[in-house]
Image (cartoon, helix red, strand yellow):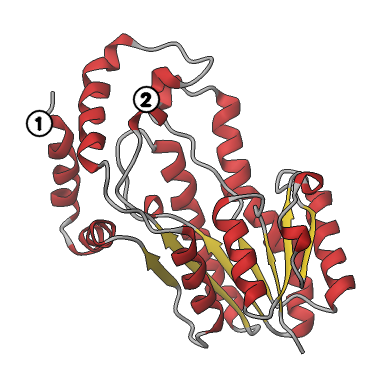
Amino acid sequence: MKKTILITGTSSGLGKTAAIHFAAKGWNVIATMRSPEKEQELTKLDNILVTKLDVQQPATIASAIQIGIDTFGQIDVLVNNAGYGEFGLFENTPEDQVSMQFDVNVFGVMNTIRTILPHFREKKAGTIINISSGAGRFTLPLISLYAASKFALEGFSEALSFELAALGIGVKIVEPGGASTNFSNVSGEKFSGKTPIADYNPFLNAAGQLFATLQGQRLATSEEVAEVIYTAVTDGTDTLRYVVGNEDFKNRMKARSTMPDQDYINSIKDSYLKFM
């Protein structure tokens, strides 16, 4: 019997690539997105069911899971991929955008997992893959909200893995990353509706030069991340975390876990303070 995977956030990027990757491996794929009526590529592929799921609308979560079970008989794997990054100065970020960052990256994941767990418990099997980020393990300037959401996701995933292991349900975290960042996308003054705060200008300029030094380094491709997700699903281990990215990214991840805490914090400060 073919296995079935439900993936959130498949309208573009990693989610779409993962859907195509699993379908090519012979899986049934429930490819979910907020606006399935706009999808033109996945609907043409065999073994892929495209349906609506908006992690901020619980009714659509329940509906997508039920449609997937009705279509394919069961769901074996859930990939929580839907998410986005809120970048910029915390003080400049409106409260509604703070709430949305957690609604999508944390509470949406929790609601999707809670909804599918009765099905997994009935089968006494299932795998949950939560897509995190290097920002769930280490931070950089101007990503306080995104990092906070991913730190929350990591803590939730790790604790949940203990709860569900006894039921035959696995929880795994995939941590994609890379060093290249376009500072024009993270500068506070680039956000619509945000008024620049002049007091931060020296810091913003320094952070901009920090990010400029990271430009051009190769990011992990969506195909590479999709392959790691496939490995996490099929390797038969209880490994919790899977890291995928370039050597700089992997070195940052290693440094965060091996360096004395204050030494690591000082190294990040030094990387941008030298520009001030």
On screen, residue 258 above or below 187: below
Q: Residue at x 75, y 51 (%)?
A: 40
Q: Position of residue 194 (x, y in %)?
A: 48, 15
Question: Residue 123, located in which quarter of the rendered image?
Answer: bottom right
Specify the amino acid type for callout 1: Lys
Q: Position of residue 67 (x, y in %)?
A: 87, 64
Q: Earlier in the sequence, mark 1 or mark 2?
A: 2
Task: State the residue position of label 2.
Answer: 187
Quick one: SS at disc 2? loop
Q: Is residue 60 left or right of residue 171?
A: right
Q: Residue at x 54, y 43 (%)?
A: 84
On screen, residue 231 above or below 197: below
Q: Position of residue 139 (x, y in %)?
A: 32, 45
Q: Is residue 262 left or right of residue 13?
A: left
Q: In which quarter of the image is the C terminus?
A: top left
Q: How many marks?
A: 2
Q: In this view, does 42 lie to the left or right of 265?
A: right
Q: Position of residue 109 (x, y in %)?
A: 63, 55
On screen, residue 191 above or below 233: above
Q: In this view, does 22 lie to the left or right of 158?
A: right
Task: State the residue position of label 1.
Answer: 274
Query: How far apart are the two marked residues, 1 and 2, measured between alpha carbons?
Result: 19 Å
Q: Residue at x 40, y 22 (%)?
A: 188
On screen, residue 213 above or below 42: above
Specify the amino acid type for callout 2: Ser
Q: Label 2 crowding class (10 Å Cα cut-off): few <14, some 14-19, many 20+?
A: some
